[in-house]
Amino acid sequence: MKIRKSYSEQETEAIGFELGLLLKDEIRVVILLDGELGAGKTTFAKGLARGLGVTTIVNSPTFTIMKKYKSKDRMHAMYHLDLYRLEGEGTDFDLEEYIDGNGMIVIEWPYQVSSFLPTDYLLVKIIKLGDTEREFMMECHGYPCKRAVQLI
Ligand SMILES: Nc1ncnc2c1ncn2[C@@H]1O[C@H](COP(=O)(O)OP(=O)(O)OP(=O)(O)O)[C@@H](O)[C@H]1O
Ligand SMILES: [Mg+2]
């Protein structure tokens, strides 16, 4: 487990960027972003995408459930899911319906679907400590994020 702190939106994006760089060559990694409204989940996801080499605009997929991004060199993909609107959907959610290849899978509001949790994942818990102060708790459950969490 690793704890990092941020005092600005830019710093949050930078931590995401670092993690994105560390994980970009993994074939598949699931990152769960947990935190209240406005905690900084989407900001962090933007940093992750930049770390993979995505140069297009990354914004919240709130109205689409999933948005897919490709890095400029086409070597890396990021699937960005926001499950906020699935509240109360019970157990009826299959991640594989949204994923059509390898890459990084980033999920905001992962606990909206009661039974949903992949077996291996990296949990990033964001705690809002003040207007601009945030704490990031990063915890690797299973392979392949152990090394990244040690290094970040
Ligand atoms: N240290 C910080 N890190 C990230 N965002 C910050 C920070 N300080 C202030 N902010 C502000 O908090 C907001 C974070 O928005 P963001 O969309 O990233 O949150 P979110 O967790 O994805 O929210 P939602 O639950 O609505 O999806 C932005 O308005 C940003 O400017
Ligand atoms: Mg968001």
Image: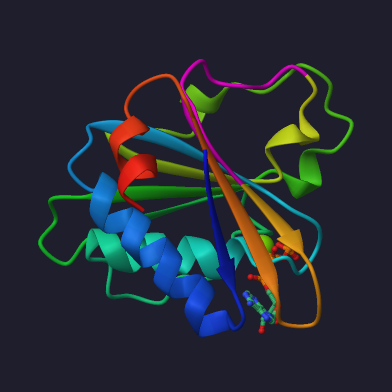
Q: Position of residue 72 (x, y in %)?
A: 16, 67
Say above or below: 80 vs 104.
below
Q: Position of residue 62 (x, y in %)?
A: 68, 59
Instruction: Tell which of 50 and 132 is nearer to you.
Output: 132
Q: Position of residue 109 (x, y in %)?
A: 71, 45
Instruction: Tell which of 61 and 30 is nearer to you.
Output: 30
Residue in view at x 76 percent, y 69 percent:
38
Q: Position of residue 82 (x, y in %)?
A: 64, 49
Q: How is the image coloured?
A: rainbow
Residue 49 visible in the picture: yes
Ligand 1 visible in quadrant: bottom right
Residue in view at x 68 percent, y 59 percent:
63
Residue 70 visible in the picture: no
Residue in view at x 28 percent, y 45 percent:
23
* Magenta residues (range): 115-124
Whether residue 129 appears in magenta in the rendering, the answer is no
Instruction: Tell which of 117 and 56 is nearer to you.
Output: 117
Residue in view at x 83 percent, y 28 percent:
89
Say above or below: 13 vs 122.
below
User: With 118 as the anchor, is 19 left or right in this view?
Assistant: left
User: With 2 as the anchor, is 145 left or right in this view?
Assistant: left
Whether residue 117 appears in magenta in the rendering, the answer is yes
User: With 59 as the anchor, is 26 left or right in this view?
Assistant: left
Residue 30 quadrant: top left
User: With 69 as the anchor, is 123 left or right in this view?
Assistant: right
Q: Is the stretch drawn in magenta largely helix, strand or loop?
A: loop
Residue 150 quadrant: top left
Instruction: Tell which of 57 and 31 is nearer to you.
Output: 31
